[in-house]
Amino acid sequence: MPAAKSIRRAFLFLIVLLLIAGWLGWRQLQGPELPGYRLETRPLVQRVVASGEVDTQSLAQVGSEITGVIAARHVREGDAVKAGDLLLELRDDEQRARLREAEAALQQLIDSARPQAEATARETQHNLEQASRELKRRKALFDRKLLASEPLEQARRAELTARAVRDRARFAAAALAEGGSEERVQQQRLEAARAALAKTRVHAQVDGIVQTRDVEPGDLVQPGRTLLTIARSGSSEILLPLDEKNLAPVKLGQAAKVIADAYPERVLQARVSFIAPSVDTARGTIDVHLDLLEPADFLRQGMTVSVNIETGRREQALVLPNDALLARNGTRAQVLRINEGVVERVEVRLGLLGTALSEVIEGLTAGDLVLAAEAEAGQRVRVREQPMPHGIRD
């Protein structure tokens, strides 16, 4: 009896071993388990991602119109200024002296020269009238044969002389009269003196932020020298030195998102506004400019930013993770598709190329299984399906 029990246990143990061996053999025939994906359709966005910097479209260079010595500086780098704000003052002793001289000359014309000219004009008019009466009297005596011709000629010459003197006095009085040529000349000299004095005050012509200053009190400055640089408000843009291999999908007007490294929580909307006509051969990059679509006062000149340009979008696309693509060459690639448990190498043509997913437009259909690992064509494998990565991340 004990022998029969031992035989039974041995038989059962053998059956178990045979089952295990059969299962292992079947698994071996099915091949190794490898990761893979099942193709599906979903929204897809193609993006170009790169790093850039904050730049300024408009830099106003501030200088002096006259030669002078700086007396005071009222701004420094980083200061916000409005149009009309006082930036610099030059020493103005000479200009003030000229202004006082011009004011005094105008006042002297009003208080002295003009009244004198008017008095002279009245006097010469009186003299002319008297000379005219004398000429008339002598002419009457001459007509009555009571006066010789010589005294008559003397009276006529005196009358002519008085008339000439009167005319000159009138011209002088007219020149010195209110609104006359002499007053206009003095007014122009006064305005020139005021303008020269005004040039000793350097004011901002635009709203913006002071970027650089190259002057201090005591410096001698001359026209043509840049003393301050102001970045015009609202003129900030993003300068993106893009690798030339990523240029093809980038077009004017494309939307982009900008994140400053210093402010990662603030996402700014932008748009491609300019693409340089030539490539920087030394770096292999091409400059792409983006206009910000909203105010961003926290940005500073030269600040580093990350840029994400949307270069294409599909609301529904047959997508495949990029790590499943082999032998990729432009829009051509190969994938390892599983057909009834057997690996086969398939040529595919790609459309949009996302950062994690790419669009397949030829070679595969929705529901196909493809490997995300190396395997030999014709090999039997088992697929461990992996979740698809996200194709859109706003």
Image: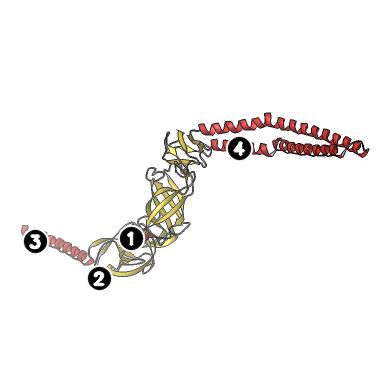
26 sits to left or right of 314? left
User: Which numbered disc covers residue 189?
Assistant: 4
Earlier in the chain: of badge 3 and badge 1, it is 3
User: What amino acid does circle 1 point to?
Assistant: Asn
Judge the density around disc 4: few (<14), some (14-19), many (≥20) Cα neighbours within 10 Å: some
Judge the density around disc 2: few (<14), some (14-19), many (≥20) Cα neighbours within 10 Å: few
User: What amino acid does circle 3 point to?
Assistant: Ile
Judged from the image, the secondary structure of the residue bearing numbered disc 4 is helix
The answer to whether 163 is drawn above or below residue 247 in the figure is above
Q: Where is residue 157 in the image (x, y as percent from the top left)?
A: 80, 39
Name the residue that disc number 1 marks.
Answer: 322
Q: Where is residue 382 in the image (x, y as percent from the top left)?
A: 26, 63
Judged from the image, the secondary structure of the residue bearing numbered disc 1 is helix
Residue at x 44% of width, y 53% of height: 289
Residue 329 or residue 120, whichever sits in front: 120
Residue occupying the far top of the picture: 111
Residue 343 occupies quadrant: bottom left
Q: Can residue 69 be seen in this view?
A: yes
176 sits to left or right of 215? right
User: Which numbered disc covers residue 378?
Assistant: 2
User: Which numbered disc covers residue 7?
Assistant: 3
Earlier in the chain: of badge 3 and badge 2, it is 3
